[in-house]
Amino acid sequence: MPDIHARLSASGAKKWINCPGSIQLEENFEDKPSEFAQEGTNAHALGEAKIRLATKEYNRTKYHNAIRNIDITEDMEDYAEGYKNFVIERYNSALRKTPDAILMLEQRLDFSNYVPDGFGTGDAVIIANGKLEIIDLKYGKGVEVSAVENPQLRLYALGAYEAFDMLYGIEKVTMTIYQPRLDNISSESITAAKLLEWGETVKKAAQLANDDSVTDCIAGSHCDTGFCKARPACRAYTAEKQRLAVYDFKAPALLTTEEIADVLDQSAAIKKWAELVSDYALDQAYKHGVQYPGFKVVEGRSNRKYSKPDTEVAKILTDKGYSEDDIMVSKIKGITDIEKLLGKKTFSDILGPYIMKPPGKPTLVHSEDKRPAISSAEQAQEDFKNDIN
Ligand code: SF4
């Protein structure tokens, strides 16, 4: 769950660890409520209730009361069920080794010994003799989140370590991201000693970030992955994006392969930056009357649409003698909708043999991308020739 009150939040830790000036600069920008935040909150509440039912902490009545006011989509039901199964499986595994292992849900974790006023909420915390595991449900599907060297999870782990080490003598710490909508389960295990050592470096970074006399802004990948609110107006971020200006708009054929790789590396970030600046300027101009020389706010283009529901429009036309064939289009629903209607298993039983996935258009991506590289067309022809010879 998001930690919303601490000035130096755990979810923003990657940002303030790398850029001490970001805390102050971001304070000049409003928080924009995310349309997906409520969905994430609902998924967490449903997952939590399912686990409490599975561990018999809730009976059926309590469970239904807990989920009564949650807006649950069918997808969410499946994803929360998967999360529940995952947590229970991890808990059972801990119980097999330590019969008095404990599972805590939505546990407040206080790491203020490392970060001023720092706290967060651990979605699922499992503690057994010598071992601690933090499981964090991420319901978003925009960006795949890794648990490796993830400062948010490490700060939560520090909070849990401080609270439970005395009782359980924690030596090993595992931090896991469960991100069902991207089929992503990512884990990192480190020794408690390494966690504490990391905690000391973060303590220094947190002091720096919390010090209002420190205004150094240092740009890097954390600006985008940390969704820094200051990006549209941050000079350090802008300077980083302008790095490509050294190529002076040379034709691609005049650039070296290394220079082209550099442009490829930066182009998505520059596109994103231009969008950020554009959205920020529109917001400032429309809501706050800021005038940008040479620009004005107008109504965007829009398409005509019926002012009444389709059924009413259809009736108007059939009353005038037009046939349904002339005015209606009938087509089968898309795969996602049919799968929702049938459920995954029935869908697979009935339609599995009739589903195909055509090869995607060749796309140049960063070498860290998980998809395997494909051969070029020429290479494929060569391979084919070699196969038949
Ligand atoms: S955009 Fe980047 S450099 Fe600028 S304040 Fe935010 S994190 Fe720091």
Image (tube, grey):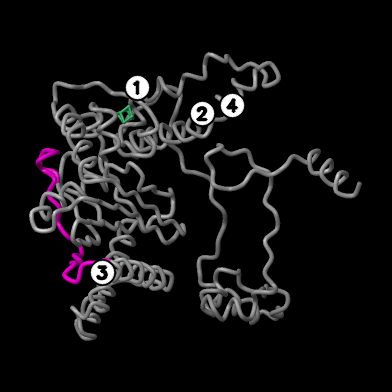
Badge 4 crowding class, 10 Å Cα cut-off, few under 14, some 14 to 19, many 20 or more, is few
* Observer-nearest of 8 and 99: 99
CA gap, disc 3 and disc 2: 40 Å
Q: Secondary structure at mark 3?
A: helix
Q: Quadrant of ligand 1?
A: top left
Image height of 280 relative to 293, above or below: below
Is label 1's Cβ within 8 Å of ligand 1? Answer: yes
Label number found at residue 261: 4
Q: Position of residue 316 (x, y in %)?
A: 60, 77
The residue range painted magenta reads 94-118
> In the displayed structure, does residue 378 sit left or right of residue 321?
right
Residue linked to disc 1: 236
Q: Quadrant of residue 267?
A: top right
Is label 2's Cβ within 8 Å of ligand 1? Answer: no
Question: Residue sitting at 67 percent across and 18 percent down?
Answer: 251
Circles 2 and 4 in contact, beta carbons < 8 Å: no
Badge 3 or badge 2: first in the primary sequence: 3
Question: Residue sitting at 39 percent across and 36 percent down?
Answer: 224
Label number found at residue 266: 2
Badge 1 or badge 2: first in the primary sequence: 1
Circles 1 and 3 in contact, beta carbons < 8 Å: no
Q: Quadrant of residue 149?
A: top left
